[in-house]
Image: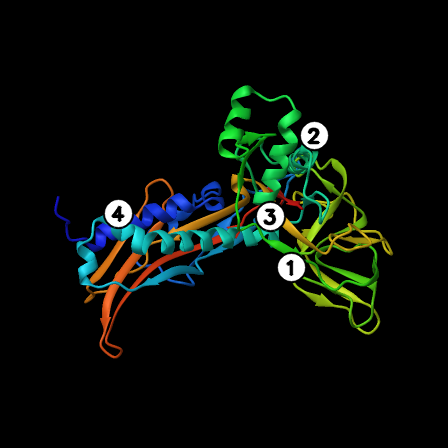
Amino acid sequence: MANILLTDSIIAKEALMIVENNLSITKKINRRYESKFAQDGKKIGDYLDIRYPVRVQGRQGEEMIEEDIEEQSVRLQIDQLEGQDLSFGGVDLVLKIEDFRRRYLDTSCAFIANRIDRFFATRYLDVPNFQGTPGTVPTSTQTYLNAGVTMSDYGVPPGDRYMIISPQMQATIINALQGLFQAAGSIAEQYRTGQMGYALGFEFAFNQNIRSHTVGALGGTPLVNGASQSGASLITDGWTATTGAVAQGDIIDAAGALGVNPMSKDSTGNRRQYTITAAGTANGSGQLTIQISPSIVLSGAYQNVSAAPTNDGAIRIFGHASSYAATATRQGLAFHKEWMTAAFVDLPLHKGLEMSARAKSNQLALSIRIEKGYDIRKHKELCRLDVLFGGKQMYGDFACRVVS
């Protein structure tokens, strides 16, 4: 059977399928706001302000109590452009699509998918909670179960929970589960595929993009400096002067401030954890104001701690040798679908090119553009594949790092 001329539409659709099939983390998060970017030709920098559901305190008894409503929002910005540049001539367009895919698309599109997943894996930086022992790959189910407990403590629904871990973490836990009771079908599937599947309240998957985090220089014996602190920063002292430092993504907790359930406001019994949102270094007096998330909220509908951190209370730093015994750790992620939101948008099509086409999937709403033209200055045929998207954490407590 003779080869047919490959068109821009055929190539775009094939590229779309390859990218979509190679995505892992990205498939698990919500994209309900994607339609807000549905207009043709969106560009880098476009954004949407998304309002959170309002929280209220309610009342007991017959007497009416007026309650001020506080609305909060988060900005979803379209600021990620991933692509791959190709070089092929007109003669290649008469190849069979299978040959063209193998020669040009498979590696290029797998790279694009890898970069998209990598972006979402990097958002571990925004997650304030963790379970596990830094520097040690979990060898029992308890670590993964504890991640589920942490999420439940903060009101996360039981369904739509995912566990994305490194290949080594998956291999270790599958091996550890060999001697435990499981359904025969689950054991057979794990043996056949080498993958966990659904277990321990999560749908498991491994991803080579799971990031490794290195903590700041740290140093000293950090303490809370001042009582009744609240908000997105924490004043501290006791650091090694001028060299004690924290890095973005470090996790800390502070004595006296226990987490609370967002609905009942009952204490979880464990210290509230915070992720550091900006790197910082102590001054000459060993003082350091740390930028944190979530903000410390002491009362009201959005209360998230039982009390303010205790003045002169000890601060523990995830990964600090004197706190949790490691410095660089893999950041597996347990999360609910609502942890993050993402939006893939249609890039504009330019006129006057040899090729200019988009393809969009119905299932993932992923959009990819291919464009090909001639550069008269360099006497070259140029071709590019592009995907434009954005992602934003919606609820930090809807995820929990699982470290190794």
For disc 3, the marked residue is: 70
Q: Mark 1: which secondary structure?
A: loop
Q: Mark 2: which secondary structure?
A: loop
Amino acid type, label 2: Gln
Q: Nearer the viewer, residue 252 or 320?
A: 320
- Please report whichever mark, 3 or 1, sits nearer to the chain's N-terminal start: 3
In the image, which is nearer the foreground, mark 3 or mark 1? 1
Q: Position of residue 53 (x, y in %)?
A: 54, 42
Numbered mark located on residue 174 in the image: none
How many numbered badges does the structure rendering display? 4
Task: Work out which quarter of the rendered image holds the N terminus and state it.
Answer: top left
Location of residue 87 by image quarter = bottom left
Q: Mark 4: which secondary structure?
A: helix
Q: Residue at x 78, y 51 (%)?
A: 325
For disc 2, the marked residue is: 60
Numbered mark located on residue 277 in the image: 1
Amino acid type, label 4: Glu
Q: Position of residue 381 (x, y in %)?
A: 24, 69
Task: Please rate how many residues cluster around mark 2, counting C-alpha atoms within 10 Å: few if below 14, some from 14 to 19, many from 20.
Answer: few
Q: Distance of mark 2 from mark 4, alpha carbons? A: 67 Å
Q: Residue at x 14, y 50 (%)?
A: 4
- Please report whichever mark, 2 or 3, sits nearer to the chain's N-terminal start: 2
Q: Distance of mark 3 from mark 1, alpha carbons? A: 24 Å
144 lies left or right of 357: right
Amino acid type, label 1: Thr
